[in-house]
Image (cartoon, grey):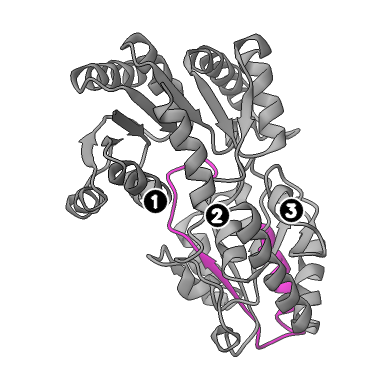
Amino acid sequence: MRIAIIGNQARSAINFRGPLISELTRAGHVVFVYAPDYDPNTREAIRGLGATPVDASMSRTGLNPLSDLRTFISLMRLIRGQKIDSVLAYFAKPVIYGMLAARLAGVPRRVGLIEGAGMVFTANASESLKRRTVRVVMTCLYAVSLRCATEVFVLNTQDQDLFTSIRGVRRGPVSKLPGIGIDLSHYAKREEGDIADVPTFCLPARLIEEKGIKYFVSAARQLVDEFPDARFVVLGGIEDSPSAISKSQMSEWAREGVIVWPGAVQDVREYVGVATALVLPTYYREGLPRSILEAMAMGVAVITTDAPGCSDAVIHEENGLIVQQRDARQLAAAMRRYLSNPDLARRHGEAGRQRAESFYDVRDVNATLITSLVRS
């Protein structure tokens, strides 16, 4: 079959869809990977997986009617021109415009994977009229696109309820995957000697307010005097987003010595794999955070919030600790427990690896997606 995988970042296709692409090409399928931001390295990496990189115009964020219309027309032309038999689209815009374009292009198998409802569906009392308006528009766009999909997958129960209501039950079920899967050999369980000599808490995330960066910094301030050897590491590059944490703010926190900020890193294993715990104090509408699965696979304890998606992977007091959203005191208290009792963090980390092996093996997730894509 001729299969198109549509995303909004070439690197995410390599990092998150790489095993799926490899399995499809090894099975003899012709795979095209659509993305808007290829460079020589990412093109070569996609070719190395046995697939063909395809330039597809698409912005990651924002709603611009003319730009999005061009995206839709471009996708429909590409799909028709390459005589695609099956489409997998993931992330918001690829799903919205990819499902509709594939339907109008006559593609028989159209699979949408929604990896989280995102900022648009993260409601709060002080949100702007613009945010509420965008939510209404996105809901309407999703309603049209999801009815064009032959199958729709989400990653947590809350999103399953949300997108079932948007799609309509008469259009078919919205199915839940156990995350996007994790390569358990790549994110191998660490050895005892791999753990850092000093207590380390690592937050890898997009640097936007909804990921709880400010609460992490506030919690670190509460602990630095009591535990002067502890390190609080934030991984991530500056984002182009209305709620982005500025470079000057990140640099100021780093200069103060509250956090360590290496910026965006190529391989999070070098940081997360040695940490006492991964910390994700998000109040974002997550799907099922990849960073949590990576930490679990490596045997690292997790501290996160009760935000959608997070509690699907982390069982409180079993493989990590769950705190309330937007509560720096609770977050500091959770980190203090691991600082005072390193054995507890180790036990939670070991339980996380066992849970990853039982539920989040990428081979199992990919088998479900492949069946959906190649089913006649």
Which residue bears the numbered disc 1?
19
At a point 40% along the width and 35% down the height, the residue shown is 60
Q: In the displayed structure, does residue 48 sit left or right of residue 252?
A: left
Which residue bears the numbered disc 3?
305
Q: Nearer the viewer, residue 27 or 216?
A: 27
Q: Is there any visible trace of residue 370 in the rendered image?
A: yes
Is 205 situated above or below 307?
below
Disc number lying in front (3 or 1): 1
Q: Which mark is residue 132?
A: none
Q: Nearer the viewer, residue 4 or 283?
A: 4
Is 270 situated above or below 368?
below
Q: Looking at the image, is mark 2 or mark 3 earlier in the sequence?
A: 3
* Type of the residue with mark 2: Asp
Disc number lying in front (2 or 3): 2
* Type of the residue with mark 1: Pro
Q: What element does badge 2 sit on? A: loop
Q: In the displayed structure, does residue 135 sit left or right of residue 266?
A: right
Q: Is there any visible trace of residue 63 in the rendered image?
A: no
Label 3 packing within 10 angstroms: few (<14), some (14-19), many (20+): many
Q: CA distance from mark 2 to mark 3?
A: 23 Å
Please provide percent x and percent y for residue 130. Answer: 58, 24
At a point 43% along the width and 25% down the height, the residue shown is 375
Q: Looking at the image, is mark 1 or mark 2 earlier in the sequence?
A: 1
- The quadrant of the picture occupied by the N terminus is top left
Which residue bears the numbered disc 2?
361
Q: CA distance from mark 3 to mark 1?
A: 29 Å
Label 1 packing within 10 angstroms: few (<14), some (14-19), many (20+): some
- Which range of residues does the magenta coloring cover? 214-243
